[in-house]
Amino acid sequence: MKKYVIAFFLLMFSFQHAQDKIRDVLTLSEYLGYVKRYHPIVKQANLTINKSAAKLLKARGAFDPKIEIDFDKKRFKENHYYTHLNGSFKIPTWYGIALKANFEQNEGLYLNPENQGSINGLYTAGIEISLARGLLTNNRMTTLKQAKLFLNQAKEEQQIAVNKILYNASLSYFKWLKSYHEKRVFDSFLNNAKLRFKGTKRAYEEGAKPAIDTLEAGITLNSRRLNLEKARIQLVQSSLELSTYLWLNENTPIELKETIIPDLKTFDTIDRTFNIALFHDENFDIEQHPKIKALGFKIKSLAVNRRLKMNNLLPKVDVQYQFISPNSMQINAFNTNNYKAGINFSMPLFVRKERGALALAKIKLQDKKLENNATKVVLKNKITALQKQLASYISQNEFTFKIVRDYAVLLSAEERKFFLGESSLFLVNYREQQFMDSKLKAIGLENAFFIAKAGLFKAAVIAIN
């Protein structure tokens, strides 16, 4: 009988090993690579950068040279009242200075005297300057600076969003791996129960065992079948959950085939997959964390806005000076005797609107700085806690391995005594249940270890290659 049991186990092991060899293995690295490349939410996160780039292009448009043409003509009862033609070319610069050139031609019977000039038109060239408000900073400068900062901020936030998807996807992979491990355990123990039931039944038929032993062996067999069915359904559910992250492209989801299995050596490769090796206490700079960098760009943007609000406290003093000439082909035709000049001054008496806007800008800036400081502390503590948790899991794993090994020895000894007639089926089932529970606990502990690794990856936001 003992030789039969050993031969049966060797046969089952060989069969299971052959089955695993013909199956395709989906590693964690390959799986996350598919998710990062094809998942629609990852594509959606990439749109954030495109959106910020479009806003930056829009902000640059405020510095585009501008051509304007204004034509107006009136004719009534055979009388040519007037014809106005005014064309201008304006170049805004970085500071509150603009270069402007203009051509003006007016003719007709009823022209305003100030519009009368040369028959061939008048050419003007000059400059417009904001001397106080708007000189060193203005709306278009602020908008462009903020657009650049928002683009950098969007890149960091995009990385955070993508890694969040990868984190959730990895949890599904670990759940799938755990379910697969559990099903393998219940498969092996079901085979033991079948073998034990057949042996007990044969012993009963030969008069070596009482009928109650066959009943107990049958109950154990059905319990193992029930456990296996639950594990099978759990594996199906976890594989379907895993499939929600697998896409061929942004429009075509993929369903995981039954012939594909998880990588049983994930424990040895998880650090390399998550790039955890790049993360160490002594060289990790919290300032390089994408969340902190994103907050830094936001703080810089609010500082730029505060500077604009401070500038708005100044009075508005806009001056312009343009040379006038009837001939644009000669540079020396422009002289100081012919010119147009003007000044525009305005300032509210109490400046309450501007002072209120500045106070709000300062509050927003201070609020974001406080958030930045608090976030640093939270991240540091979270990373430290996860590291200590992982260290504890490593120790727990060593203890669990010894427990599983010792329960295996106890079960083997109890089975040997049973087949020698020195033990009972009850004790064998009891030892086997302890062994099975210890293996399931080891699987659960390994899964908790993987989840903690993924949590460290999420907390540190380390990019996956």
Image (cartoon, helix red, strand yellow):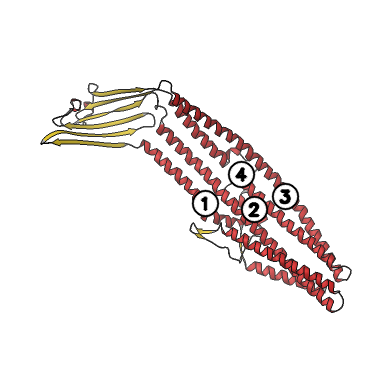
Q: Which residue is mark 2?
A: 270
Q: Sequence-wise, which precedes: disc 2 or disc 4?
A: 2
In the displayed structure, 243 sits above or below 45; it is: below
Label 1–label 4 contact, CB within 8 A: no
Label 2 vs label 3, nearer the camera:
3
User: Which quadrant is home to the N terminus?
Assistant: bottom right
Label 2–label 4 contact, CB within 8 A: no
Task: Say what secondary structure mark 1 lies in.
Answer: helix
x%, y% of residue 146?
46, 36
The amino acid type of the residue labelled 4 equals Ala
The amino acid type of the residue labelled 1 equals Val
Q: CA distance from mark 2 to mark 3?
A: 15 Å
10 Å neighbourhood of mark 3: few (<14), some, or many (≥20)? Answer: some
Q: Which residue is mark 1?
A: 42
Q: CA distance from mark 3 to mark 1?
A: 32 Å
Label 3–label 4 contact, CB within 8 A: no
Q: Which residue is mark 3?
A: 393
